[in-house]
Amino acid sequence: MKLLTKLSFKKQRSQFIIVMLVLAGLLTAATSAVQYWYAHEELRKSAHDHAKSRLELKSMEIQAAMTSVESAINNSVWMVEKRIYQPDSIYSILQRLVAQNVQIVGATAAFKADFYPQFGRWCELYVSQRRDGSFEQKQIGGPLHDYLQSDWFREGIKANACNWSEPYYDNIGAKMLVCTYTMPIRNANGRIVGLLDADVSLEWLAHFANSQTTYKSSYNVILSKGGKLLVHPDKHILLRSTMRDQDISQKDRAFDQISRQMFRGMSGHSEVITMKGEKKHVFFTPVRGHTGWSIAMVFNDDEIYATLQQATFRMSAILLAGLLLLGYIIWRSIRNMRRLEDTRREKAAFERELRVASRIQMALLPKSFPPYPERNDVDLHATLVPAKEVGGDLYDFYIRDEKMFFCIGDVSGKGIPASLVMAITRTLFRNVSARESKPHSIVSAMNNTLAEDNQNNFFVTLFVGVLDLPTGVLSYCNAGHEPPIIINETATPLKVDSNLPIGAISQWHYTMQEITITPQTTIFLYTDGVTEAKDAAHNQFGRQRMLRELTSNANPKTIVDNMTAAIHSFVGGARQSDDITMMAVCYNKQERAVRLNRSLTLTNDVSNIPELTKFVNEVCREVDFNNSKTKQVRLAMEEAVVNVIDYAYPHGTTGKIYIEAVANDERLKFTITDSGKPFDITAYPEVDLNIPAEERPIGGLGIHIVRQMMDSINYNRIDGKNVLTLRKKL
């Protein structure tokens, strides 16, 4: 009886164990099913988010690369127009374009029929770089290469503005598949006489577009604005009319719709089935800017879920194995968790990339302070603390021809797009101010460039100042930015005009304002991240608290450091919500006793140069200059005065030129004043003496000599007069 009872108990226990195992198996199966679903959704979402962000980043990288090509052409066309009747000198401009831009494989200046009689009907000047680094220059237009009938030339002329051509094979110049960016060349009457263009290699574009792909099977496709393939793994189908020529035909004709959407400049995602039955994901978005291109990322669905599907098959097999089911599922669950950890690691890797982007962005800004330790007339300190890995604030400064150019700005929006706009804005400031001295002209040029095709509606609040260091005259233009604070005995906001931020509306008329600041005056510039810094209760730091923290008789670094400490003390442990940028510029010019003051008045006649020479020799002798220094000063003064004679007064008119020599215990200063038409000799760009003389553009050598002979040169237009100042240390 006891034996039967024991056997019955064992049977019940076995049944219980079986039931428990079955229940455990069912529970495990249900748990595994739920885990599979969540893992599947997580992988899908992660893959989609990653693909979108990578595609958007690649689109912006291509836009930035093409924008640099556009900027190079746009900034060079005026030089071609200036030398339009000197065709041989145009080659040096084209060579500089090719040498300074890795994207450009060849640059061309192509003119309308019979424009240059010496060349006949065709004149297409072309420059490319050989593999050994040398440059090839040639005129390639002719009966065998009638560019006048080429689509890129006719479309560029017809566009009457900048234009990206459809892709084509250049069998004469680049001898490869290219896409061409053109800009009209106009004569003095404003009529289009030809095109300045740059060729971009499709092979380079393909390598650039498909660098750092997300998956092994993924690749990027680029469509031109006309719907032709610019980039595709199969080079044999490039230049075809639509993406339907690819090998990704599908049952539901989804790719027809994708092609139409890409052609219209839309963004989106679709899943397609190939003729081989493979499921693929296609993400697409337009490339912003003037190109009109659209980019798509294509990758296999199996590559996303391959490991997950394999795990499901194994777990199903283990369920049939009975008792081993639980252990196997746990093992598979651990593996699934490891895969999720891989996903998190990818996210961490992306965050590391953002940190690298932040370091690159910060590297664009000046960070060495004090920036000019050798000068005793100006001091400056600045700081930028982004709220996230990358930000949209910017500042910049430099000195040219005894003028300090400086700016501060704030880009609308956050993240990577704002950081790219920030980098472009800072580059525009450097490029434009290198040839323009008026702040409102600098801001206007920057605005017109940023406003072109601004489909993302980014804008930048910007303040641009030009401080004339010899006189203390501050010229400035404010484009919707916070007014700077003038600190001397008190802290007072600078009066600024109401101008729109740049990038909002093209051709906006920006105004310039001027004040004269006295020595020991500091200009404090900041972004709204200072006044809008919030504590844990969302109270703002505010302008009044900022003004109370600004004290006189403090150097720029102390001012910025004290303001930073005040903000940190106010916000406490609250998270920073906006970029915080500050810059303090202190004008420290010291007046010195005058030991010599001489003057001379001449008429605009080169026959008076000997009288100038005698005057300069006498002044140099009085300040004890040796023969070498006297020769340098004499050469610079003669060159400067001859320029005034040649350009300030119209031919056939008579005018006076006033020359004043003033010396203190530190330097000798010559001031040349005339009442002629505005003429800024310092506006000429630097001369590249590495280029052979016959290839250099005409002009600019005289100002180069003056800059080399004197320590500084400065130009101002004051009360309708040209005032040119040259200085030489004693």
Image (spheres, grey):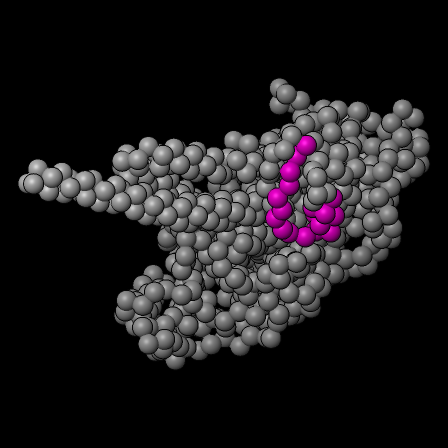
Whether 6 is among the magenta residues is: no
Q: Nearer the viewer, residue 168 or 650?
A: 168
Q: Is residue 569 visible?
A: yes
- Left or right for 148, reference 305: right
Q: Nearer the viewer, residue 62 or 386?
A: 62
Q: Please name the residue shown 46% across and 49% down the image.
A: 41
Q: Please name the residue shown 41% across and 57% down the image.
A: 388
Q: Please name the residue shown 71% across and 36% down the image.
A: 249
User: Is 686 above or below relative to 494?
Assistant: above
Q: Which residues are magenta?
A: 256-275
Q: Nearer the viewer, residue 171 or 15?
A: 15
- Left or right for 20, reference 223: left
The percent coordinates of residue 680 (x first, y second) are 66, 55
Question: Would you identify the image quadrant in which residue 725 lies?
Answer: bottom right
User: Is 7 above or below relative to 522?
Assistant: above
Q: Please name the residue shown 36% across and 72% down the image.
A: 534
Q: Is residue 637 visible?
A: no
User: Is 502 above or below relative to 647?
Assistant: below
The percent coordinates of residue 692 (x first, y second) are 67, 28
Residue that sits furthest to the left in the current view: 2
Total numbered circles? 0
The percent coordinates of residue 531 (x first, y second) are 41, 73
- Left or right for 694, reference 152: left
Q: Tell me the quarter of the image containing the N terminus.
A: top left
The percent coordinates of residue 390 (x first, y second) are 44, 53
Residue that sits furthest to the top in the current view: 132
Whether 262 is among the magenta residues is: yes
